[in-house]
Image: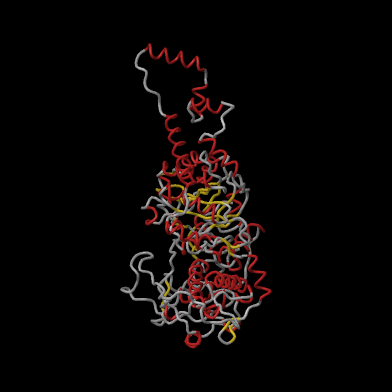
Amino acid sequence: MSKTADQICGMAFIKPQYIIPFEPSKESTKNETVSKGDGGEPPTKKQKSTGQNKNRPKMNKTPRSSKLCPSLCRIRVGEEVEGRCTFPNCGFSHEIADYLAKKPSNLGEVCHNFRTFGQCHYGLTCRYGSDHIKGSANVINAELWEKTEKRKPVRNVIDREVQMDLRKRVYGFSRAAAALKVAQSSIARSKASSAPKNKIESEEDRKKEDKNSSQNGDGFAENHCEGKNTDLANSKADENQDTFTEDEQINFRLDEKKKIHWKDKLYLAPLTTVGNLPFRRICKKLGADITCGEMAMASCLLQGTNSEWALVKRHHTEDLFGVQVCGSNVEVMIKCAQVLDEKAEVDFIDINMGCPIDLVYKQGAGSALMRRQSALEHMVKGMTQVLSVPLTLKMRAAIYHDTRIAHSLIGQAKHWGVSLFTVHGRSREQRYTKQADWKYVEECAQAADPVPLFGNGDIMSFEDYNIHKENSQISGVMIGRGALIKPWIFTEIKEQRHWDISSSERFDIIKEYVNNGLEHWGSDTEGVEKTRRFLLEWLSFLHRYIPVGLLETLPQQINQRPPPYVGRNDMETLMASRNVKDWVKISEMLLGPVPDDFMFLPKHKANSWS
C-alpha cells in the first residue's frame, strides 16, 4: 500500500469531534523547563537553557551527613546496632532515631519491593517503609526472600574484586593482547597478498616469471585470492602441523561461538537514557524478542565505573540479551570484550557505529567508525577472537546524506566474523529529520548475504513491519522510537492488529514501569526521584501516541504531528498533553508530590515530527 506525502508527514487525521482549537497559552508545544520552586511557571527568555541539551538542571545531592549509614539501613528486628559500621571515618549518620524523625513522610502504605521479594533492600530509608518498618528495624518475609534470592532477578552486577582489579589496572588481559596480535598479523598478511607485484621491466624477466608461474600451477593465484601466501598454504597442507595459523584461529573461534537464530525476531533498539532495564522489561512483556543494554563506553567499563556497569545489568526475563559498547581505540574495545565475556552473562555484543552525538563522533567512535575502516577491521577481528558469543554491528546508512557507504562497508565486514548487521536508514547528518530509506536498507541486506541484516527506522505499526518485510531480504527489524511511543507495538506486530488500548491500560503499563524503577533504582528518596525523572523522559515520547479510536486514517505514522485534541476521557486527554507540567502530574499520581527544588527538562529532543 503506497502512502501519500500527507500520510507520511504533516498532520495526523483525527476525527473532527475530538479536535479543539489550539490555544498557545494553555498548550505549550515546546519542552520547557519545569520548576516547582518558581510555581511551575516556564522560565523567561534569559532563564532558558541555551542550545540543545546544554545547562540542563541537575538533581541536588543530599549531603552524606543527612543519610543513614548503609550498614544500618537493613537492620532487622532483634539485631544489634553497635559494631555494624567498620569504617572509622564514615561520613554517614549512625543515629537511627534521629534519622527517622527527620525522614520525609511516606509516599504510600505498600512497599512494592517488600511485597515482591520479602525484604526491602532500602530498609529504613524506604519511602514506603510503613509496610516493613517496626519501631527502628525491618521485618522480613523469610520464605519469600529465600525464593527470590535464589532466582537472582538481576544479573551482571560487577563483583567488587573485579572492579578493584580494573581500577588498579591489574586485571589480566593476556587474551586481549594475543587477539590483537592475531588481528594485526591477519590484516598485514591480507594487505601484503593483495598488493600488486613489482613491475617486470625486461622481456626476459617477464618470460622467467611466466615460466615459474606455469611450473607452480595455479596455486600462487589461488593463495592470493584467499588472502594467504604460499608458505602458509604449504604449512596448512603439512599433515604433521599441530598449530593453527592466524586465519584458522579466527575461523575456529567462529565455529565455537554460541549460535543465535536471528530470523524474524523483533529487536528493541539500544536506546540511550530511555532504554533502561525497567523499560526493557515492559517491552519484553509486550512481545520484544531481543533486548540490548544502553550504549556503554568501553573506556568507562574498563575503569570499573559503577554508572557504566549499571548499563550492563540484565533482568532474568531478558532471554536474548546483548550489550552495546562504544569506543574508538582498538585495544580498549578488545579488552572490554574480554571482560564482558568473562564477567557478564550476555548473548551477544554489539559495536555502536551509529551514534551521531558530536562528543562521541569527534573521538572517532560511534558513526565515525564508518570512516575508520582499518581501525574497525582490527577491532572486529580482535573482539571476535576473545568472545564466545556473537559480535554484531549497528550502523547508519552513511555519515553524510549524499555519500552512502554502509553497503560497501558491509560487503567487506561480513568476512571479518560479524554475526548480524543492523542498518538505520538515515545518515548521521540527517539525524531524525528525514524518512528512513528502506530501499537502501534492502540494498545493504543484499550486500550482507549470507550474514543476516536487520532494518531500523520509522516502524510504527504492524503494517509498516509487513511492508518492509515483504519481498525483502532483511532478516528482521529493530524498533526504537516506535517502541518508546507505543511499547505495545510488539504485540500489534505479532497479533497483526491495531490495538485500541484504553487510557486505563496505558496507565497500568506506566504503573508497572514505576514498580520496575523502584526495584532497579531504589525506593529511598534518591531512587524515587530517579524513577520519576526516567519516567518523565519516557513520557516525552509516550504522549505522541494517538489512540486508534480517534484516528480517521490508520495507521499513525511516526512523523505525523497531531492537532490539539481531547481524548475520550480525562486520563486520555492528560496523556496526550505536550505540556511538561502535565507529565509531572502523571508522575505525582504514582510517586507522590515532587520535591520543592524539583526541576525537569527533557534530555531527548529528537525531531520526530518533520
Q: How many numbered marks have been drawn onto this rendered protein structure?
A: 0
What's the image's color scheme?
secondary structure
In this rendering, the answer to whether 316 lies above or below 565 is above
Asked if one can make out residue 104 in the rendered structure from this viewpoint, the answer is no
Q: Determine the residue located farthest toward the left in the rendered image.
A: 46
In this rendering, the answer to whether 224 lies above or below 261 is above
In this rendering, the answer to whether 472 lies above or below 197 is below
Q: Determine the residue located farthest toward the right in the rendered image.
A: 143
In percent of width and height, residue 542 lies at 53, 67
In this rendering, the answer to whether 183 lies above or below 299 is above
In percent of width and height, residue 139 lies at 62, 81
- What residue is at 40 percent from the left and 45 percent from the top? 402
In percent of width and height, residue 355 lies at 44, 54
Which residue is at the front of the view, 543 or 135? 135
Which residue is at the front of the view, 501 or 272? 272
Asked if one can make out residue 185 in the rendered structure from this viewpoint, the answer is yes
Query: In which quarter of the view is residue 374 placed?
Result: top left
Query: In which quarter of the view is residue 451 placed?
Result: top right
In percent of width and height, residue 130 lies at 58, 84
Q: In which quarter of the image is the C terminus?
A: bottom left
- What residue is at 48 percent from the left and 44 percent from the top? 382
Which residue is at the front of the view, 369 or 116? 116
In this picture, residue 549 sits left or right of residue 95: right
